[in-house]
Amino acid sequence: MDYKELGEAISKKTALLDLVLDNTKKAFVMFKTIAKEIIDGLAEDYPGKFFFRDKSEFEFEIRFGADILIYTMHTNVFEFSRQHEVMKLPYIKEDKERSFNGMINIYNFLTDSFDYNRDNDIGYLIGRLFINKENHYFVEGKREVGLLYSSFNTSVINRESVTDIIISSMEYANNFDLLTPPFDEVKAISVGEIRQNSASKKLITAKRLGFEFKQDKD
């Protein structure tokens, strides 16, 4: 490959990545807009229980009940590994450029973890959305949030699909309950922590601390 061919290859790849990133940015704006509409609508019916916060160009959060959902957009474009199931789809085999995707992550945290500055508490990635150059998408996730890889060739990101993803992620978080950790994992605490009245900050709280996701076995 001479330098002109290299220049052409780099230019083509850059154009692809720019297109995918632009699609992902537009999708994330749609997520923000619709999430705010949903939360504002719920807040009218249930004052003081639903909150939306636009944190930055690439992050926003919604609060409801005991939960926070944080949506973040990654600023890079990713390709799936050769071992990933999605790479086996005819849709990808027909055009390998379709395997380059932008990514939006959905994390679930406890509201109290932030309100009481419990920095050791754990949140969970409950879903991540992949969007390609054709605005096709699929979601890797838990239960209500996840979609089948096989729908990648037909699922297009739009207002209806974004609404479904947001509502599904809220439903999952609401049904994903806080369970007590095993006694032996939390029975010890230092004198210093008690004296400093910081036990609540030192002990880790998470929805499934010490437990395994049932769906992780599938």
Image: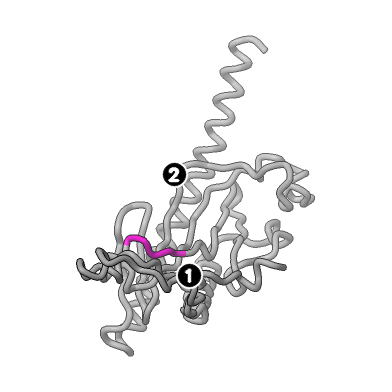
Q: Residue at x 29, y 58 (%)?
A: 55
What residue sits right under mark 2 in the picture?
75
Judge left or right: residue 176 versus residue 213: left
164 versus 76 height, above or below: below
Q: Residue furthest left?
A: 196
Q: Amino acid at mark 1?
A: Glu
Q: Percent x, y for residue 148? A: 69, 64
In the rendered picture of this protein, how many numbered marks are placed on residues?
A: 2
Measured in 3D between alpha carbons, the distance from the residue under mark 2 to the one under mark 1, in whole angstroms, is 38 Å
Identify the image quadrant of the N terminus: top right
**In the image, residue 143 lies at what x, y percent?**
62, 73
Q: Residue furthest front?
A: 191
The residue located at (36%, 83%) in the rendering is: 42
Q: Secondary structure at mark 1?
A: helix
Of the image marks 2 and 1, the number of the one nearer the N terminus: 2
From the viewer's side, name the closer residue of 50 and 98. Answer: 50
Q: Quadrant of the C terminus?
A: bottom right
Sort mark 1 into few (<14), some (14-19) or many (20+) by Cα contacts within 10 Å. few
Please say which color scheme the image uses.
Answer: one colour
What residue is disc 1 on?
A: 185
Please name whichever residue, 69 or 88, is drawn nearer the observer in this view of the structure: 69
> Which label number is shown at residue 40?
none
Q: Quadrant of residue 204?
A: bottom left
Q: Tell me which segment is drawn in magenta.
A: 119-123
Between 99 and 176, the one nearer to me in the picture: 176
- The amino acid marked with disc number 2 is Thr
Name the chief secondary structure element in magenta.
loop
Q: Give how far across and how far down residue 121 sits, in percent.
A: 38, 65
